[in-house]
Image (cartoon, helix red, strand yellow):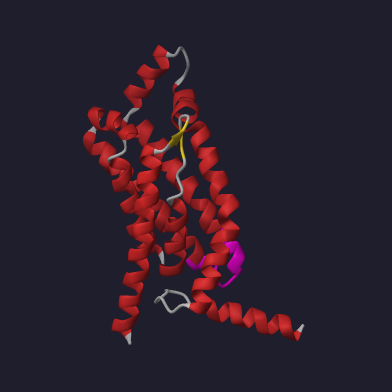
Amino acid sequence: MKNKQSIQRMVGIASLAAITAVLGFIANYVQIGTFSLNLTLIPLVIGAILYGPLAGTILGTLIGAIILVAPSTQGFLSINPFATVVLCLAKTALAGCAAGWIFKVLWRVNLILAIVLATISAPIVNTGLFAVGCFTFFLPTMQAMAADSATNVLTVVFVTMIGFNFFIEFAINVILSPTVIYIVRVISRNYNLGTSFNIGAIYKEEEIKNQED
């Protein structure tokens, strides 16, 4: 029984990893102006919810590896390869881990709230760690950019480096959080994919309660 569940978990995580990889490479090379349409955090969050913090960490690490080969990352690699690798892998891995833990702590309190908070936490953690990494590993570069543009370092990091991309990424996750709720509901109720939490049982309990009311 445990072997069967492990296989189901592996298949589920592998499927989400494949979706994440496709979306990641699309985000790397398909841009709308200066903005990359990054949807990889959605399967990341779904994996973290369905399979726990470890799965979120694995999917986040995959996203980080894809970001490393993006054209926009090559400038960072030329300045500090080690820091770039650590930052790219860590920020998305920890975003997935955080989403998994938020859901794990809150899902019995309020299932929908747990899913929504887990979904919107991913871009916040991802972007927040990127900002910390910029100040920790690339401060001289940020200072040089600020001097060239006659502005300050905070403006370079939070406007030039993050700015519009974060708000769009955050908005996408907020807008798609009902979709995440729907996907989690459908998978947990109708498919046995070795999920970490018995979410389907909660949905059934809610249905019974609603019928009684």
- Residue 79 is left or right of residue 57, and the answer is left
Query: Which residue is rendered at x = 37% and y = 47% of the image?
Result: 24
Is 117 one of the magenta-colored residues?
A: no
Picture quadrant of residue 20:
bottom left
Prevailing secondary structure class for the magenta stretch in the rendered image: helix
State whether residue 192 is above or below residue 162. below
Query: Which residue is rendered at x = 32% and y = 47% of the image?
Result: 64
Q: Which image quadrant: the N terminus?
A: bottom left
Q: Nearer the viewer, residue 152 or 95?
A: 95
Give percent across and percent down for residue 54: 35, 63
State whether residue 78 is above or below residue 111. above
Give percent across and percent down for residue 50: 45, 68
- For the question of whether residue 198 can be seen, the reply is no
The total of numbered circles placed on residues is 0
- For the question of whether residue 62 can be seen, the reply is yes
Give percent across and percent down for residue 121: 51, 52
Picture quadrant of residue 27:
top left
Give percent across and percent down for residue 16: 38, 61
Q: Which residues are magenta?
A: 104-116
Query: Which residue is rendered at x = 47% and y = 65% of the image?
Result: 49
